[in-house]
Every structure is written in structure tokens, then in C-alpha cells.
Image (cartoon, rainbow, N blue to C red):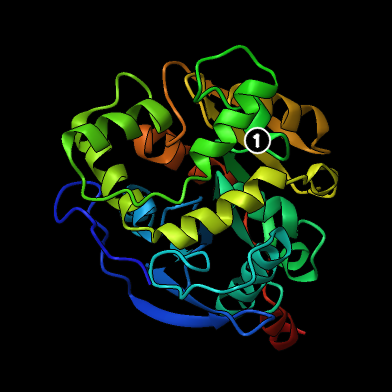
């Protein structure tokens, strides 16, 4: 289980949840789930990315929980969800299904938000029964469906075999990240954030990423290296909005444009000038506003229980 190194104050300090539950996935993996806000409020489900945790969504949770029910969970091996030997796109889909079933009433729908590997989780789950029952709309932030290593620009070389090989070695490194030092913050900022990111944003990201155990980081890097979810994009038929930073080195804007072209019901791509991969932290107000727009435009359905009572 990862070391929790979250910031203690400010907009990126994780708020206390109204309640915590454990969702059990198809293979028995146990997932830490937090629920924030009132139970009767419109639901939003947040899926974080590789090496992150529920703490990544602190700014969104703080703002949305005022009038939404915000459900955030730790991907297996991340945050307070124990590591599992099963690391695959199917496992991610299983886990999202488990969270939806554990937190939403039959027939209840939510806006589902995925960042990076969380967006890939959504694509992997697109055809799953629980996802189709519970997803009203989706926001994909800084993500892609395939060719993640080949398209990454973390290594400043021309696209080709050498860059792809070097990128795979860097992202798949088994080396420990160690403490959050000035050098570590500079490296993380270069790789994952825009050049204008404020120090407190970089600090929050560094603490979250450095808390991820290196074995977990390495195991999931191998999954992302081989990931191909192009088939899942065509099955994601609910309304989908896409957000990407123009300075994103991990999932450059080419991925967002490819998603927009392949999604059956894409609401458009918002490209954020100068921002990097960590868009929910780099542009918290904009990402939160996008979520609110989707909740307003695609309200949840009446639950089956309520339909039976009114029949």
C-alpha cells in the first residue's frame, strides 16, 4: 500500500469524505472508495491516472461536493487500494464496474470523469453492463487509447524507434523515486506539467506521484506500454467531452484529436494552451466547470426503485 504524502493545506489538500467504503472487484481485489457530499445530490465518479490516487482530485472534490455526490476511488495498487497481481485493462474495467455497483442505485446515472489511465479505464469499460447502465456522460482528461509510448514526447527526439525505446525505458523504470526534492520536482514538472505551473501545483503532484510504490508504478507501466483500446472508443456511445493540454508530453493532443474523430458522440475537444498532462490540477476551475456542464446537460435518470414506487 502506498505511502500517503498528500499536502496538508490549501486547494490540493484532500477533503475528508462523508463516508468510505470498500468495493470488491471481480477477482476479489479490494478498492478504497470515498463518497463526498449529500447522498441525494447528482453523482459524479472520478477515476484517477497512473501513479496517482483520490488525492489527485482534491480541488474538484472540494468544489463539487457542495452540491454533488462525488465518488472517488483508488485504482488497484494506488492510494489505499492494495496491490494486485492482476494488472490489465480488463482489471481496470472490472474495478470501475465494481465501484459503480457499490455506490449507485439501480438505474441511477452519473457523469464519469477519467484522467490519463482513468480515461483508459472508461474506454476499457465502455461495453460493460454496469457502465452502460450508470454512465450519463463522460469527461476524458489528458488520455489516449493506444500508441502511448510511441506518441509520448517526454524524450525530446524525433518520433521513431529510438525515441519509443528510450521512452519505454524511462517510463518503465524500476528505480525508486525517493523523497520529494527540488530536483525531483523539476523532473516531474518537465515530464508531466506545463512550464508555467505554479510551485504549489508541482508540489501537490510530486507528493501524490512519489507516494505510489515503485512495483505498482512499474507493473502498470507495462500495461500502458502495450495498451490498445481503439475498439473501446467506438463502444463509448454516451456523450463525451475531451480536455487536453497543448504542452502534454505524456498524452499529447494527437491522442485527443484521434479520440474526437473516433467517438460516436463527441462533444468536442478543449485544448488548453501551455498546460501539461495534469490538467485537473493545472486547470482545476476549468475541469470542474466542464464536469458541472455535463451534469447539467445530461441529468441522471430516475432510479428503478423510484420508478417502482411511483408506478
Residue at the limit of the structure toward the left, as seen here: 9
Asked if 18 appears above or below 120 in the picture, the reply is: below
Please name whichever residue, 288 or 40, is drawn nearer the observer in this view of the structure: 288
In the rendered structure, the answer to whether residue 224 lies left or right of residue 90 reads left
Q: Residue at x 18, y 40 (%)?
A: 181
Please name whichever residue, 173 or 29, is drawn nearer the observer in this view of the structure: 173
Indicate the quadrant where residue 134 lies.
Answer: bottom right
Residue at the limit of the structure toward the bottom, as seen here: 309
Is residue 256 shown to the viewer in this render? no
User: x and y percent of residue 31 in the render?
Assistant: 50, 76
Query: Which residue position holds label 1?
Result: 148
User: x and y percent of residue 130 in the render?
Assistant: 74, 70
Residue at the limit of the structure toward the top, as seen here: 158
Q: Which quadrant of the figure contains the C terminus?
A: bottom right
Marks counted in the figure total 1
Please name whichever residue, 15 or 50, is drawn nearer the observer in this view of the structure: 50
Q: Residue at x 33, y 75 (%)?
A: 18
Asked if 35 appears above or below 279 in the picture, the reply is: below
Is residue 115 shown to the viewer in this render? yes
Indicate the quadrant where residue 132 lies.
Answer: bottom right
User: x and y percent of residue 257 in the render?
Assistant: 70, 24
User: x and y percent of residue 221 in the render?
Assistant: 57, 49
Asked if 37 appears above or below 191 in the picture, the reply is: below
Is disc 1 placed on a helix, strand or loop? helix
Q: Which quadrant of the figure contains the N terminus?
A: bottom left
Q: Residues within 10 Å of mark 1 (few under 14, many from 20)?
A: many
Q: Residue at x 22, y 46 (%)?
A: 11
Amino acid at each position: 500500500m502506498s505511502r500517503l504524502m498528500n499536502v496538508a493545506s490549501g486547494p490540493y489538500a484532500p477533503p475528508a469524505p462523508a463516508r468510505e467504503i470498500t468495493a470488491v472487484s471481480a477477482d476479489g481485489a479490494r478498492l478504497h472508495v470515498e463518497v463526498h457530499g449529500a447522498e441525494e445530490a447528482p453523482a459524479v465518479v472520478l477515476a484517477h491516472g497512473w501513479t496517482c490516487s483520490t488525492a489527485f482530485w482534491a480541488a474538484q472534490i472540494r468544489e463539487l461536493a457542495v452540491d454533488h455526490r462525488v465518488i472517488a476511488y483508488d485504482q488497484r495498487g494506488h492510494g489505499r487500494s492494495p496491490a494486485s497481481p492482476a494488472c490489465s485493462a480488463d482489471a481496470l474495467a472490472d474495478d470501475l464496474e465494481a465501484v459503480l455497483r457499490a455506490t449507485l442505485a439501480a438505474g441511477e446515472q452519473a457523469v464519469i470523469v477519467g484522467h490519463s489511465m482513468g480515461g483508459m479505464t472508461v474506454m476499457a469499460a465502455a461495453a460493460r453492463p454496469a457502465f452502460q447502465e450508470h454512465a450519463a456522460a463522460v469527461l476524458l482528461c489528458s488520455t489516449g487509447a493506444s500508441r502511448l509510448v510511441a506518441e509520448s514526447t517526454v524524450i525530446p527526439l524525433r518520433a521513431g524507434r529510438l525515441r519509443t525505446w528510450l521512452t519505454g525505458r524511462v517510463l518503465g523504470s524500476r528505480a525508486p523515486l525517493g523523497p520529494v526534492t527540488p530536483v525531483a520536482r523539476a523532473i516531474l514538472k518537465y515530464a508531466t506539467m506545463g512550464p508555467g505551473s505554479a510551485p504549489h501545483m508541482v508540489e501537490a503532484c510530486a507528493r501524490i506521484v512519489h507516494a505510489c510504490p515503485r512495483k505498482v508504478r512499474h507493473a502498470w507501466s507495462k500495461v500502458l506500454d502495450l495498451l490498445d483500446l481503439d475498439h473501446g472508443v467506438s463502444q463509448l456511445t454516451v456523450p463525451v467531452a475531451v480536455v487536453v493540454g497543448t504542452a502534454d508530453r505524456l498524452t499529447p493532443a494527437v491522442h485527443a484529436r484521434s479520440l474526437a474523430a473516433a467517438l460516436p458522440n463527441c462533444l468536442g475537444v478543449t485544448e488548453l494552451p501551455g498546460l501539461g498532462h495534469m490538467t485537473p490540477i493545472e486547470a482545476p476551475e476549468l475541469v470542474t466547470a466542464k464536469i458541472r456542464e455535463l451534469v447539467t446537460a445530461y441529468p441522471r435518470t430516475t432510479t428503478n426503485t423510484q420508478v417502482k414506487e411511483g408506478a
